Image (cartoon, rainbow, N blue to C red):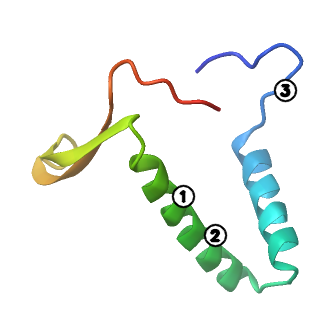
Amino acid sequence: MEAPAAGLLAMSRPQILAQRIATFLDKHNGAYCEACLVERLVVASRTTMRAALETDSFSVGAGIFTDSKTRKQVVSRRTGSNIAA
């Protein structure tokens, strides 16, 4: 993991998630029960992840998944790809 650029502070995962929840609630002008909020954030995360996988930075294809030794759709990072923050 790279060090943050000068003048920038690194955020922990809980801080990143808290920021994302706050942004979601601000954007949707509402209050949600915990279960509904989690469901909506999961759906939003899946949509964002799928959009990210469609960029040139990743290669998606069939292969043998190393953990379970089964043939599945696998994602790998393309060599030389530069992912902007």
Circle nearer the viewer, 1 or 3: 1
Instruction: Please state which amino acid type lies under the numbered disc 1.
Output: Thr
Spatial distance from mark 2 to mark 1, Cα to Cα?
10 Å
| Sequence-first disc among 1 and 3 | 3
Residue at 49% over, 64% down:
46
In this rendering, the answer to whether 28 lies above or below 62 is below
* Residue topped by disc 1: 48
Residue 41 occupies quadrant: bottom right
Q: Residues within 10 Å of mark 2 (few under 14, many from 20)?
A: some
Q: Is residue 56 above or below residue 38?
A: above
Residue 78's x, y, as percent?
Answer: 32, 28
Mark carried by residue 9: 3
Q: Which numbered disc, 2 or 1, marks the residue that appears first in the sequence?
A: 2
Q: Closer to the camera: disc 2 or disc 1?
A: 1
From the viewer's side, name the closer residue of 12 and 7. Answer: 7
Residue situated in front as seen by the camera: 26 or 71: 26
> Gap between marks 3 and 2, in whole Å?
25 Å
Residue labelled with disc 2: 41
Left or right of 38 on screen, residue 68: left
The percent coordinates of residue 55 (x first, y second) are 42, 43
